[in-house]
Amino acid sequence: MKKDTLLTHVARDPAKYQGMVNTPVYRTSTVIYPDLGSYEARGGDDYKKVRYGLYGTPTTFALEEAIAKMEGGHAAVVVPSGLAAIAAPLAAFLKTGDHLLVVDSVYGPTRTFCDRHLKPNGVEVEYYDPRIGAGIDKLLKAGTRAVFCESPGSLTFEMQDIPAIAAAAHARGVPVLADTTWGTPYFFRPFEHGIDVSIHAGTKYINGHSDILLGAIVTNERCWKTVRKTVAEYGYCVSPDDCYMALRGFRTIGVRMNHQMASALKIAGWLQARPEVKRVIYPALEGDPGHALWKRDFEGAASLFSFILNPARPAAVKAFIDALELFGIGSSWGGFESLAIVARVEGHRTATAWDPGGPLIRLHIGLEDPDDLIADLEQGFAKLKSVV
Ligand SMILES: *Cc1c(COP(=O)(O)O)cnc(C)c1O
């Protein structure tokens, strides 16, 4: 089955639900058993059986199955946020005295979790250059218990050579965890590139409508029990209503992403030719430093990218962003609507220097007509120039 067909048919079983196209919303805390024997036999490692609301209902399982199958993983578990999907596997693999390698361009709250929770608990956290590739071998130690990747980073978009990193890590039996939110299960196949644990902010493109917080962790067979048990032990659980909505959004991820990628490429190309713009940072563009890796490993690009303005006064940058009428000013991405922010990376890195040479603007391109978005950016640039 091709991926668009799978996306339409995966995790549906109308015969089981009175002919309903979608798995309905099942809400429960308690599950009642026919007799004491079956109640007392309810536990174990089979988290795909209904046993208690915390571990999911058929609504949860449908979403988990859809994400896992689209990505080609062994199984998936959903958690209340993307950040929870990062914290749980890190907690699962690391204990006092262990060593963790984390990419320097990682999502800010991941770094905060490592610095404020793992480090004080005695985990040695070491940040590494996103472009390290096979060179990660030199940083792996006897106590290294996980390598954390994010490719590309969601502000600066450096691509990582994941297969090279995974080969070095696996040679020492170290699992590779990766935040694959940008790639999505539609455009990236993590398990074919050596990732053991794939982490998603389902909040973004999987749900796609900016109205739900959700995380998903997909693993290979080897890592499944460790990760699934830890999620259960932390008590993470997602409302079946949110699972239903997320699966409803996920069904259309293909049309959304293909459309949004085409718009993003058009807008990025337009920006490249603008005198106000120093450089566009988008691995999908030819000439981007990460383009070759992106082309080798990805089937498409998210509509999230950045560009560097030529040096401009803060008041001019503010005038530009404030002038935008179609781009919302706000966090997150992956919804149907466009967003713009000034990305402030300065001072956050420890392993590499980041000096873009001008203000860094991050855009999320939504489902609007790209020509309208271009016109909006153009009038924004007029405002930028009017501030002297
Ligand atoms: C948004 C985001 C997250 C966290 O997702 P939440 O659901 O907001 O907690 C994790 N990683 C990346 C790359 C993100 O952009």
Image (cartoon, grey):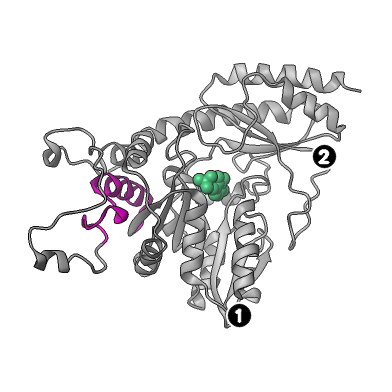
Answer with left or right where residue 67 lies relative to residue 209.
left
Packing grade of label 1 (10 A; few <14, some 14-19, many >=20) is some
Residue range of the region highlighted in magenta in the rendering:
47-73
Q: Residue at x 75, y 60 (%)?
A: 352
Q: Position of residue 347 (x, y in %)?
A: 78, 53
Q: Amino acid at mark 1?
A: Lys
Instruction: Kindly give the residue lying farthest to the right in the view shown.
Output: 388
Element under label 2? loop
Q: Position of residue 1 (x, y in %)?
A: 27, 43
Left or right of 234, for residue 364: right
Mark sitting earlier along the chain (2/1): 1
Residue position marked by numbered label 2 in the rendering: 358
The amino acid type, in three-letter code, at marker 2 is Gly
Q: Residue at x 66, y 64 (%)?
A: 132
Instruction: Please give the residue where the numbered disc 1 appears in the rendered image.
Output: 141
Q: CA distance from mark 2 to mark 1?
A: 38 Å
Q: x, y (%) of residue 160?
A: 60, 56
- Note whether residue 29 is visible: yes
Label 1: element kind: loop
Membership of 154 in magenta stretch: no
Q: Residue at x 42, y 43 (%)?
A: 186
Tell me which corner region of the image, top left, top right, bottom left or bottom right, holds residue 305. top right
Residue 63 magenta: yes
Main SS of the magenta part reads helix
Nearer-the-camera pick, 288 or 169 = 169
Residue at mark 1: C-beta within 8 A of ligand 1 = no
Residue at x-position 66% and y-position 45%: 155
